Image: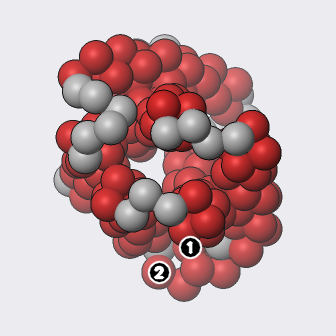
């Protein structure tokens, strides 16, 4: 089991760092919108736009990943998420945020496809279950621990949006070092 973990540590570490930011960002947006008095319709639309982007992206990113490779695709999607996070912190418009969430869902789908396909390529039929269990641990641990980052600043400030962008950018490093 330790040998399996050694082969997948880079993509899992990248996933963990990325999802730390994602866990922070998902809750941050709802808190920010609630503090600004946004309606349930706007909050639901933003969430729906994110998942629509996730679905669209999961069907559309394969050709891009095949063309540029896993590391470059991951870098492009993570960079896009960093920019989208900062834009949402800088442009307080519900309709712009809905569009940015759609694009963010698309980029997030690209990141998931990159990591999951990379892990499946690294594994054998006998080790895929173990590899995917490590994947799920990294995913849920990052999502849960990301919530604690909300304590670092106010949802009204740009700080938490910037932290999300930094984590997205930092998630590229483990994969870039492979």
Vertical placement of residue 104 versus 123, above or below: below
Q: Residue at x 54, y 84 (%)?
A: 67
Front residue of 32 and 53: 32
Vertical placement of residue 105 versus 63, above or below: above
On the image, the x and y values in percent for residue 85 come to 39, 55
* Residue contact at pointers 1 and 2, CB within 8 angstroms: yes
Local packing at callout 2 (Cα closer than 10 Å; few below 14, some 14-19, many 20+) is few
Front residue of 65 and 19: 19
Marks counted in the figure total: 2
Tell me, yes or no, if residue 71 can be seen here. no
Q: Is residue 129 left or right of residue 140?
A: right
Q: Is residue 28 left or right of residue 103?
A: left
Toward the front, the furthest residue is 37
On the image, the x and y values in percent for residue 68 come to 47, 81
Q: Is residue 136 left or right of residue 16?
A: right
- Secondary structure state at the residue bearing disc 2: helix
Residue bearing the label numbered 1: 65
Q: Residue at x 65, y 72 (%)?
A: 61
- Secondary structure state at the residue bearing disc 1: helix
Residue bearing the label numbered 2: 68
Tell me, yes or no, if residue 108 can be seen here. yes
Q: Residue at x 43, y 58 (%)?
A: 92
């Amino acid at each position: 089991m330790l040998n399996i973990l050694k082969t997948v540590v880079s993509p899992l570490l990248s996933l963990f760092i990325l999802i730390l930011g994602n866990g922070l960002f998902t809750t941050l947006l709802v808190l920010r919108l609630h503090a600004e008095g946004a309606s349930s319709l706007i909050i639901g639309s933003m969430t729906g736009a994110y998942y629509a982007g996730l679905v669209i992206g999961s069907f559309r990113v394969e050709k891009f990943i095949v063309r540029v490779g896993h590391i470059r695709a991951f870098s492009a999607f993570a960079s896009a998420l960093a920019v989208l996070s900062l834009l949402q912190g800088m442009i307080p418009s519900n309709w712009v945020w809905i569009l940015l969430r759609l694009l963010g869902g698309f980029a997030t789908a690209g990141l998931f496809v990159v990591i999951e396909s990379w892990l499946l390529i690294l594994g054998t039929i006998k080790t895929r279950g173990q590899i995917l269990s490590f994947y799920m641990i990294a995913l849920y641990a990052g999502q849960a621990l990301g919530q604690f980052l909300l304590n670092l600043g106010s949802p009204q400030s740009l700080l938490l949006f910037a932290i999300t962008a930094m984590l997205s950018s930092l998630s590229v490093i483990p994969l870039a070092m492979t």
